[in-house]
Amino acid sequence: MPIERVVIENFKAFRHLELPLNPHMNLIVGNNEVGKSTLLEAIHAVLTGQLHGRGIAYEVTPYLFHQPTVQAYLAGLRQGQPGTPPRIMIEAYLGRDPGLAALRGTNNSLGADTAGLRLLIELNEDYREEFDVYLQHQGGSLPVESYTVRWYSFAHNGVTARSVPFDSTIIDTTATRTLSGADRYIAGIIDQVLTPAQRVALSLSYRRMRHSFAQEADVAAINTFLAQNTGDISHKPLTVGVDTSARSTWEASLSPYLDELPFTQAGKGEQSAVKMKLAMRAAGTAHVLLVEEPENHLSFSSMAQLIDKIAALSTLQQVVIATHSSFVLNKLGVDNVILFSASGHIKLDQLPPDTHDYFMKLPGHDTLRLILARQAILVEGPSDELIVQRAFKDHHGVAPLARGVDVISVKSLAFKRFLQIAQRLNIPTRVVTDNDGDVAVLQERYADYLNDIYYDSDEGAPSLEQQLIKANSLAQLNQVLDKTFADEAALLKFMRGNKTDTALAIFNSPHSIVFPDYVQRAIA
């Protein structure tokens, strides 16, 4: 029973979002501040009624609302054009699984007959007068004290955490929220991992420990002193002790330890690894697993193991991951990517099967750089990248990234696969490549992308080194390389045997050279 679709209105980064989800794996990528983390928060909130580990009613602030929408509303009020007070709406569409029949109805923004959950944060009309008075005299922000939280099903029945037969686990190792000195995140995860009997036993032991505090000799002496001075303080006996009420639970005070070191004092990598492993244990029974940047603070080997576990879980559960890692992206399938940007989102699916398998088996490619680029130039190796970088700077006066162009080094065999991704995402992409002495083969290989391939048709100069010699005099290149080669043959031998050194010398040289025509066309 996966989430088929999420609809979000006026929640943080989103004014409006309607996002279909894959039933198993979803990889959310994008630049900072485009809503990746917000999406995970929204999904978890509508499924559990919680935000930041607490009931969402306790976490409502003016900053949960989409700020441009709020500002537009407030501006309208100042201009005498009152509109509808902003509200937050989050909907999860859960399909027609018979097990969710109690949640099925048409009470949703799309009018769909399906099971689902709806979370609304909206003005409580009982406080409309106070709301209007505040905005009339203050008007700087929304008075969320006048708002109420409504959580119900598409059948229009109110729901609780116990009544929802659908659950999610959110894994966020970057969380730093604390609860009375304890890590709220890991306390909650441990609570999920423990059996009901274990939770009861821990709670009772904790209560007994608190009760025994008052029996300590020093504490008893202090309480005797206070009792002797009752009249000076209160007419009733005053003592000190530890709260043993039901609300005073172990989660708020007990701190996990690692090898006798408080958990919060352990290294970030160790903390992340422990949080991840515990959360994965807890995630086994959840319908939806939400993961925030699994690559954070983890070594490569630890991250690889984690990704393998997540991949295994995705065969049984729905997984939504926000990531900045090309390794994670490639390993879990580039066809599962959902790209978020300031202008909206797009799904990267329907890639050819061989391209999908290629990136799965060789996950080291910088696919994320391409996905996040405004424009891209693909080259065959690091030396080519340096040459194109310098050519671009000489032509435009600035480095490529200053113009939103990412020069990415990939193996020539991957050009076609990167172009398939670029085409799907409408990212302008050019390829700078050697002709390798056979133009016909090159043209056949890239028959579907000939407008994107930049090369020289002179088969007598099949490599970039030969093209540089063809475009420049021996004296020019000797000056740039700080060499004294007597002829072009010696120069070519050096350049072929020292590709990186040659490229670095050209890149760093105070002297300009003439770049091959196909390079100039690619960077124009």
Image: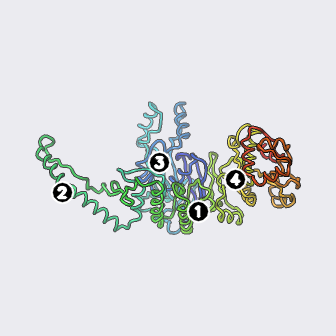
Q: What residue type is labelled 4?
A: Leu
Mark 1 or mark 4: name the one nearer the start of the chain. 1
Distance in Å between CA atoms under marks 4 and 3: 34 Å
Question: Residue 366: which quarter of the image?
Answer: bottom right
Residue 480 locus on image (x, y percent): 77, 42
Distance in Å between CA atoms under marks 2 and 1: 55 Å
Mark 4 or mark 2: name the one nearer the start of the chain. 2
Q: Name the residue under label 4.
A: 425
Q: Residues within 10 Å of mark 1 (few under 14, many from 20)?
A: many
Q: Which amino acid does label 2 sit on?
A: Gln
Distance in Å between CA atoms under marks 4 and 2: 69 Å
Q: Nearer the viewer, residue 92 or 474?
A: 474
Q: Name the residue under label 1.
A: 25
For image coordinates 42% across by 55% down, the residue present is 266
Q: Name the residue under label 3.
A: 121
For image coordinates 56% across by 55% down, the residue present is 322
Q: What residue type is labelled 1?
A: Met
